Image (cartoon, helix red, strand yellow):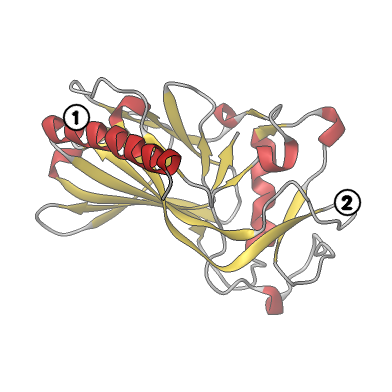
Amino acid sequence: MNRRDFLSVMGGVAVLSKASTSFALDGGTTPLYVKGLVILDMEDSKTLKLAFPKAPGHKATLSIVPENGSSRTMTIKGHGSLESKNLITSSDPRIFVPELVRMQEFYGKSVRSRVNEAPSIISIPYNAIQSVTTSEVSSDRITFVRADNGKEVNSFRPRRVAETIKIELSSSGILKLDNNKVSIPLETTRELRVEYAPETMTGFDGYRDHFQHFFSYVERPAALDFDVVPQKVGGNSAPMPSGGHHYAMVWPDAFCYPAGIP
């Protein structure tokens, strides 16, 4: 390892150690796992938003694993947020999600978020987050093609895309959901799992059909007003027809993956 790489690595360790120390003093962390058709809106410099697009046939759920007692699952409705009186002072969490599909990979840096129009949003202040990392990736490498002409999008790097995102939250926080009707103290919670997925799997075309639900929440430059379609690397580059069911094309591991803005 050369000197530049060594200093870079040590600098990263120092930043992470400082954040870890802050959270240790604050009462530790609670992991939140995010999976399915969820938008991670990182456009705001102070708040990370988890948005659930309008998607017929899909259901958003939260699984709560307590430190003691039995797990329970609830349906996510309306808006929610993470609140805490003892947030850490840093608002610069470690974010490392290179596998996450980001809209700017298709539409450039001019892409803007419209997730405030989503029916359900969970807002999390960055100073309540220690880190955002990839927990699981797809079993297949994915690329994207244009829906209008079937040509591969060269600005996207083909890869195994993020299937599950892990967000380390301050355990001093209280997650409030269903427009503040439900409160979940993180200090008594071992982990949380959010998933937004089809209620019935039979007859779905998987990631191909479901990715289209993201476009209503993305503002694109006029010159780049085209949709994109995911496909496995090495697969047929022609976009699938928009109607009907194609049972042979069902994706084997997951039907929906998260996406990021920008």
Total label count? 2
Q: Horizontally, is 41 left or right of 244 in the view? A: left
Position of residue 1 relative to residue 17, above or below, is below
Expressed as whole percent of the image width and height from the top left, the position of residue 70 reads: 15, 59
Residue 165's tag is: none
Which residue has dot 2 on it?
148
Residue at the spot x=14%, y=39% of the render? 187
Q: Residue at x 25, y 20 (%)?
A: 89
Q: Viewer-nearest of labels 2 and 1?
A: 1
Observer able to see residue 181: no
Q: Which x, y percent locates residue 116? A: 55, 27
Q: Is residue 58 above or below residue 126?
A: below
31 vs 114, left or right, is left
Q: How far is mark 2 from mark 1, CA to CA?
A: 49 Å
The residue located at (44%, 31%) in the rendering is 48
Q: Residue furthest bottom?
A: 248
Figure quadrant of residue 77: top left
Look at the numbered disc 2 and give the secondary structure of its residue: loop
Q: Is residue 236 left or right of residue 184?
A: right
**Residue at the extreme right of the image, as rendered:** 149
Q: Amino acid under label 1? A: Ser
* Residue 45 vs residue 244, the one in the foreground: 45
Q: Which of the pair 146/198 is nearer the observer? A: 146
Quarter that holds the C terminus: top right
Which amino acid, by three-letter code, is at mark 2? Answer: Asp
Looking at this rendering, what residue extends furthest in the front direction?
2
Mark 2 surroundings: few (<14), some (14-19) or many (≥20) residues within 10 A: few
Quickly name the residue at label 1.
22
Q: Secondary structure under badge 1?
A: helix
Q: Quadrant of residue 170?
A: top left
Mark closer to the chain start, 2 or 1: 1
Picture coordinates of residue 55 (x, y %)? 60, 49
